[in-house]
Image (cartoon, helix red, strand yellow):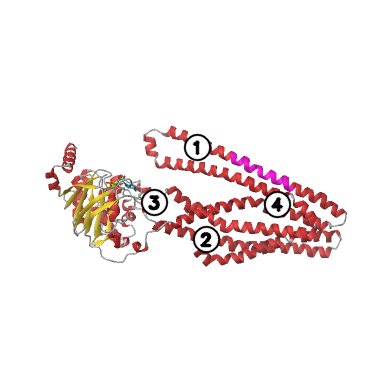
């Protein structure tokens, strides 16, 4: 997943690591200089003392410069990595088949894009730097203490440190499991809030505010308890470490003090020793956090790697080979079963539409109508030998070429949170006049006239500033503006009143001129003019023929027609 990145930017870690080691080395020079200065001061050698004081200043400056530089190389590179990962993830998500989005929760995918990328970035930046810094710092300090001051003093004074490390890792692990619980309750709470905000209309309409508030409070209380448990455990760590390092200092004080009195070590050495002891408290304390963050980074990395392994749609399907699609469609015993479906959503459906022809499809919900459209747009894979476009098997027509020729209006008419104009033009580069024309054909002109900003009205999230019927008609205009050879309308006028529907159907007749169209509709009046109508039932074609033929047949279509026309007369 990161191979390409390391090939390009990985070298940055080398100067980063060298500078970091140099920086800690310099940093661990100052206690010696301090010890020397004290010895010289005690020996009243003021000129040499001043030189030593200068040296301390230069060391500080050196530490400052090297620290700044390693941060530039390591942290800077990890930020590059974050961008790289995010780009890669997004483009990967764009090219995954829609099947993938049926199987994964959008919340989880958002978490991947935000948290996991961040955790991986931290691992290859701050965490890596901190572990290297902690290791070298402890190494250099202990080395100086043992070699420069006194080996057995060092040994005895540091005896409590392994115990401290044991506690840090032990308590750290317990903190981690408790932290997980806190995070889970946090994600429950945010899920609860999100769902409440999205479904506020329904909640209010059913007067569920109080009930929702109470269940929220229960979750909130759970989070409070989890947080308290976490605090108790993590609060234990600091006192334990302090006591253990207190022991180190005590040994240093008693044993080291005796060595000074006996003249084994100088006063300066003694001061330096204590400075080193202070110096390693921080790195030792950070071990727990580093281990924890490494584990989290690793988990995130694994999750992302698994996601990146998901197969993208083949390149063949994404490459438009520039062919012209005339628009004849033929299905031969077309059948389809969803991967997790228990029965066939489509079964032995056959039809043939010449260029410019219109096929109407009616049938109850769940009879397989929308599935047919997903197959025609290659959003679902049809089996070889069942579906043909311009006489060619659809499996050998690149999806990109096919979709360029298709104007698809899905059932839910999803809009993007931008202006109506942009929603209609939809990256086709259509001029305003073209957008206006498409909007007019889709029967939007009256709605636009009463909207305060007309074409510049913003549709809102998922288009929720518009009514269902308006959304459908914007989606219809979006299909018209592409000037497609094939129009696929999935119950596009379900939320439109009869009068508007008739007007749009009137316009549609013009739009359908020379185009192949498949129209799904609950309202049979929209299908009347079609060359052939299929009446679907449980994925099969139950009845078929022209409107007149189906009426004459006197079957289900005819019954539905009578029912609908009577209802209309009552209106
Ligand atoms: P229609 O558009 O006629 O209402 P659909 O084509 O949407 O019907 O659905 C046909 C059948 O396929 C239904 O039984 C439905 O439950 C099933 N189905 C639809 N989408 C999926 C899916 N993503 N996974 C599994 N089954 C599905
Ligand atoms: Mg449907």
Q: Main secondary structure of the magenta part?
A: helix
Q: CA distance from mark 3 to mark 2?
A: 26 Å
Q: Which residues are the magenta region?
A: 229-245
In this view of the protein, which residue sits in the foreground, 300 or 85? Answer: 300
- Residue at image x 31%, y 51%? 454
Q: In terms of secondary structure, where does tag 3 sit?
A: helix
Numbered circle sitting on residue 81:
2
Numbered circle sitting on residue 281:
4
The magenta stretch spans residue 263 = no
- Residue at image x 72%, y 64%? 58
The answer to whether 173 is drawn above or below residue 429 in the figure is: above
Q: Is mark 1 within 8 Å of ligand 1?
A: no
Numbered circle sitting on residue 569:
none
Q: CA distance from mark 3 to mark 4?
A: 49 Å
Left-right relation of 217 to 237: left
Residue 449 seen in the figure: no
Q: CA distance from mark 2 to mark 4?
A: 31 Å
Coordinates of residue 537 in the picture (x, y in percent):
23, 45
């Amino acid at each position: 997943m990161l191979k390409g990145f390391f090939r390009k930017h990985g070298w940055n870690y080398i100067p980063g690591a060298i500078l970091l080691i140099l920086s800690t080395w310099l940093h661990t020079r100052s206690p010696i200089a301090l010890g020397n200065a004290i010895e010289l001061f005690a020996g009243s050698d003021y000129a040499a003392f001043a030189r030593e004081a200068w040296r301390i200043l230069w060391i500080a400056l050196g530490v400052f410069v090297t620290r700044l530089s390693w941060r530039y190389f390591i942290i800077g590179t990890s930020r590059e990595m974050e961008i790289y990962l995010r780009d890669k993830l997004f483009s990967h998500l764009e090219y995954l088949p829609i099947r993938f989005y049926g199987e994964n929760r959008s919340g989880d995918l958002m978490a991947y894009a935000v948290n996991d990328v961040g955790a991986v970035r931290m691992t290859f930046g701050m965490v890596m730097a901190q572990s290297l810094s902690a290791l070298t710092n402890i190494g250099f300090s202990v080395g100086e203490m043992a070699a420069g001051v006194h080996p057995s003093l060092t040994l005895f004074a540091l005896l409590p440190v392994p115990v401290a490390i044991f506690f840090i890792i032990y308590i750290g692990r317990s903190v981690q499991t408790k932290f997980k619980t806190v995070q889970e309750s946090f994600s429950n709470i945010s899920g609860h809030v999100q769902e409440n905000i999205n479904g506020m209309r329904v909640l209010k309409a059913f007067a569920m505010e109080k009930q929702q508030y109470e269940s929220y409070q229960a979750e909130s209380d759970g989070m409070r308890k989890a947080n308290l448990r976490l605090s108790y455990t993590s609060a234990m760590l600091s006192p334990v470490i302090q006591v253990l390092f207190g022991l180190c200092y005590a040994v240093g004080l008693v044993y080291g003090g005796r060595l000074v009195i006996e003249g084994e070590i100088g006063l300066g050495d003694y001061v330096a020793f204590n400075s080193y002891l202070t110096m390693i408290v921080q790195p030792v304390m950070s071990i727990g956090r580093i281990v924890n963050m490494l584990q989290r980074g690793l988990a995130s990395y694994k999750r992302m790697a698994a996601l990146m392994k998901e197969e993208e749609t083949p390149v063949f399907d994404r490459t438009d080979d520039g062919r012209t699609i005339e628009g004849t469609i033929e299905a031969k015993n077309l059948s389809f079963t969803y991967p997790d479906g228990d029965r066939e959503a489509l079964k032995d459906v056959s039809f043939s539409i010449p260029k410019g022809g219109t096929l109407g499809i009616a049938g109850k919900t769940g009879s397989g109508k929308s599935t047919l459209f997903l197959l025609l747009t290659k959003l679902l894979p049809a089996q070889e030998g069942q579906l043909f476009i311009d006489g060619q098997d659809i499996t050998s027509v690149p999806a990109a070429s096919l979709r360029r020729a298709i104007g698809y209006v899905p059932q839910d008419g999803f809009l993007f949170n931008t202006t109506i104009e942009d929603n209609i033009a939809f990256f086709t580069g259509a001029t305003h006049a073209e957008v206006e024309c498409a909007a007019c054909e889709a029967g939007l002109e009256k709605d636009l006239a009463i909207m305060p900003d007309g074409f510049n009205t913003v549709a809102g999230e998922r288009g929720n500033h518009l009514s269902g019927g308006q959304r459908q008609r914007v989606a219809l205009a979006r299909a018209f503006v592409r000037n497609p050879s094939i129009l696929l309308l999935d119950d596009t006028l379900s939320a439109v009143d009869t009068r508007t529907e008739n007007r749009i159907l009137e316009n549609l007749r013009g739009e359908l001129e020379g185009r192949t169209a498949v129209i799904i509709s609950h309202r049979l009046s929209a299908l009347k003019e079609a060359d052939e109508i299929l009446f679907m039932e449980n994925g099969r074609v139950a009845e078929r023929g022209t409107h007149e033929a189906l009426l004459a047949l006197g079957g289900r279509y005819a019954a539905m027609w009578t029912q609908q026309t009577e209802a209309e007369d009552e209106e």
